[in-house]
Image: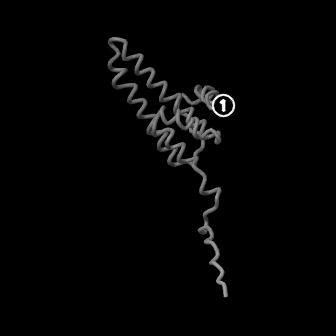
Amino acid sequence: MAQTPPPPPSQPAGATPSSVGSNKKTYTILAYVLTWIGGLIFLFVGKDDPDVKWNAANSLLIFGGLTILNIIFGFIPGLNLVTFWLIPLIGFGFWLFFLVKAIQGNGERIPAPGIGNFLNQYVEQIANAVK
């Protein structure tokens, strides 16, 4: 008499393939936590999701722009206050805002406070440039 093998285990309750594969919120958080470097990475890693690409482009544009301004102002004598205090303080404020909003949200687009209306067109261009 041959014994039949037991049936394969089924998936745990509540675990569907679509819910397991969703990394939208995680990618959005990491795009902002890692500042412009995270924006650059997740612009290409999250290229299948338009919201992840948008948030990555937003992070790249804001934090990359602040880094470039900090470098440029560092070469101008007399702007030590701007270079060493003001720009990093603004960057920390944006970083904290984006981090809180990304943790509270579900990966949706997070426009920058104050400058979001101006930057959105450039963020769209950067996000749409990656295929």
**Relative height, residue 131 to residue 73 (above, below):** below
Q: Residue 47 at x, y = what percent? A: 62, 38
- Residue drawn at 62 percent across, 32 percent down: 127
For label 1, the residue is: 128
Residue 20 image position (x, y, % from top left): 59, 57
Name the residue rendered at 42%, 29% in the picture. 90
Quadrant position of residue 108: top right
Q: Most extreme residue toward the bottom, as rendered? A: 1
Q: Residue at the top extreme?
A: 77
Q: Residue at x 64, y 27 (%)?
A: 125
Q: Tell me the colour scheme of the image.
A: one colour
Q: Secondary structure at mark 1?
A: helix
User: How many numbered dots are placed on residues in this image?
Assistant: 1
Instruction: Left or right? Give the position of 2 relative to 71.
Output: right
In the picture, measured across the screen, residue 89 lies left or right of residue 32, that is: left
x, y percent for residue 110? 56, 39
Is residue 47 or residue 125 the one in the foreground? 47
**Dot 1: few (<14), some (14–19), or many (≥20) neighbours within 10 Å?**
some
Disc 1 marks a residue whose amino acid type is Asn
Query: In which quadrant will I find the C terminus?
Result: top right
Give how far across and how far down residue 26 sits, in percent: 53, 47
Depth check: 4 or 69 in front?
4
- Quadrant containing the N terminus is bottom right
